[in-house]
Amino acid sequence: MVSRSKMMNFLGKVGVVAQTSIHLLPNHIEMGKDNLQFNSKTIHGGQHPDKGYGAVMPPVYLTSTYAQSTPGGHMGYEYSRTHNPTRTALEAALASIEDGTHGFCFGSGMAAIDAVIKLLSPGDEVISTNDLYGGSYRIFTKIFEDFGIGFHFVDMQDPANVAAKINAKTKLIWVETPTNPMMNVVDIEAMHKLVADKDILLAVDNTFASPYLQQPLTMGADIVMHSATKYLGGHSDVILGALVVRDAALAERLSFIQNASGAVCGPLDAFLVLRGIKTLHVRMQRHCENGEKIAHFLADHPKVAKVYWPGFPTHPNHEVAKRQMNGFGGMISFVLGDDSLEKATQTVEQLQLFTLAESLGGVESLAGHPASMTHASIPKAEREKSGVVDGLIRLSVGIEDSDDLIEDLKQALG
Ligand SMILES: *Cc1c(COP(=O)(O)O)cnc(C)c1O
């Protein structure tokens, strides 16, 4: 596990003083209810009835500021960029379900990623995967490279590829697993072994798996990142990002960045994600069941050439997935036998129950065409190297009746 001193060394080395006037709220630390099973933590983790009137759900505190009885005399809240009680409730819930100690919520997943990279300094290097979420690739290469941070993109399925890029400048390993849209699985414990004795942070984008399927902090990660827009919110009605850590010095620095940069989420958005989390375990169970049925339907279909889903024993990382995940999820990619751009376009347009749309993780099923949608910002040559060909279709399988979903795929493929 990561020691406190690791983060202290890290911050010291990059010349950052972890000095901050931002107090970490007691709610972050005294979460209680940590002995509960996951399926109870989604509902109760870090939560307590509202102190004012006992409301079971945290009120949406639509306020920018808080009355003080005397200068500095407040009840833990001064200004809502710094802290807001609804956001605090969500941050505590996230810390609980990710088995961390501190959660931090942002206006989007990208804002959460932005905060992590701001832990670094010019000259530092990051190693990440070569089939990264398009938006992450974009912020790394189009924004942070200009600030003097170096990025290496490697195939992380083989830890040796990561080891080969580690040098004295390496400060962060950025993992995404399962990857988007190729459903490769990266061995988080193997990544941890590579950095355990070094001043290198390990961050995992856990958006695709959700904490129901895997909890990276328990496998040695220092930072878990979420686009809560996806499975955590679960209802396609909010954009929100989150980070969870269990190291006090790291928490203090991220709290400082969160307040200083100010890319926080609003209280209503925090409320929506908090409500989403309460059914995460029930939704995920159905996403997994439907995902499995549809993966098999596609694999047996004569017009489908290839299906990418980590639940197949033939999937190259199936053993790692079985070990580190509690299920295989509802994200599936596939390539048609006729892998032309035209055929893929025609197929996604033909779908009726699956909506053609960006995003994933909601109760409704979505279909996407990565090459022209989510991954359009990655150059074609770069994209195809990792398998994102023009004929690739990605499904986010929702929680509708699986027979209806299969009927829809049947007619679209037919
Ligand atoms: C959507 C997504 C993001 C970005 O999150 P936003 O909430 O859209 O800003 C980052 N990583 C992954 C894997 C995603 O799917």
Image (cartoon, grey):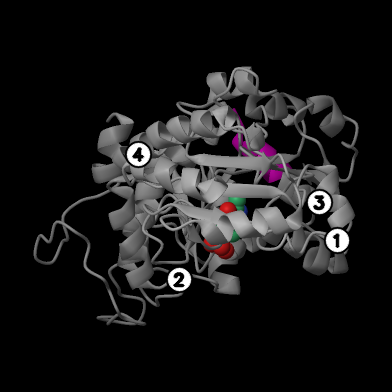
Label 3 is placed on what type of residue? Answer: Arg
Q: Secondary structure at mark 1?
A: loop
Secondary structure, mark 3, is helix
Q: Badge 2 is on which residue?
A: 82
> What distance separates the C-alpha of mark 3 from that of mark 2?
39 Å
Q: Is mark 1 within 8 Å of ligand 1?
A: no
4 and 3 marks in contact (CB < 8 Å): no
Residue 5 belongs to magenta span: yes
Please report whichever mark, 4 or 3, sits nearer to the chain's N-terminal start. Answer: 3
Q: Any mark on residue 403, and which?
A: 4
Give the label on residue 122, or none. Answer: 1
Residue that mark 3 sits on: 383
Residue shown at 89% from the left, 53% from the top: 381
Task: Look at the picture and state if 350 lies above or below 410.
Answer: below
Asked whether disc 2 touches disc 4, contact meaning CB atoms under 8 Å apart, the reply is no
Q: Quadrant of residue 316?
A: top right
Of residues 227 and 191, the one nearer the viewer is 227
* SS type, badge 2: loop
Q: Is residue 351 visible in the rendered structure shown here? A: yes
Q: Quadrant of the N terminus?
A: top right
Q: Which residues are magenta?
A: 1-9
**Label 1 is placed on what type of residue?**
Pro
* Image coordinates for residue 73, horizontal then vertical, percent: 30, 75
Report crowding for label 4: few under 14, some 14 to 19, many 20 or more residues within 10 A (C-alpha).
Answer: few
Instruction: Return the disc, 1 or 2, that comes first in the chain's sequence.
Output: 2
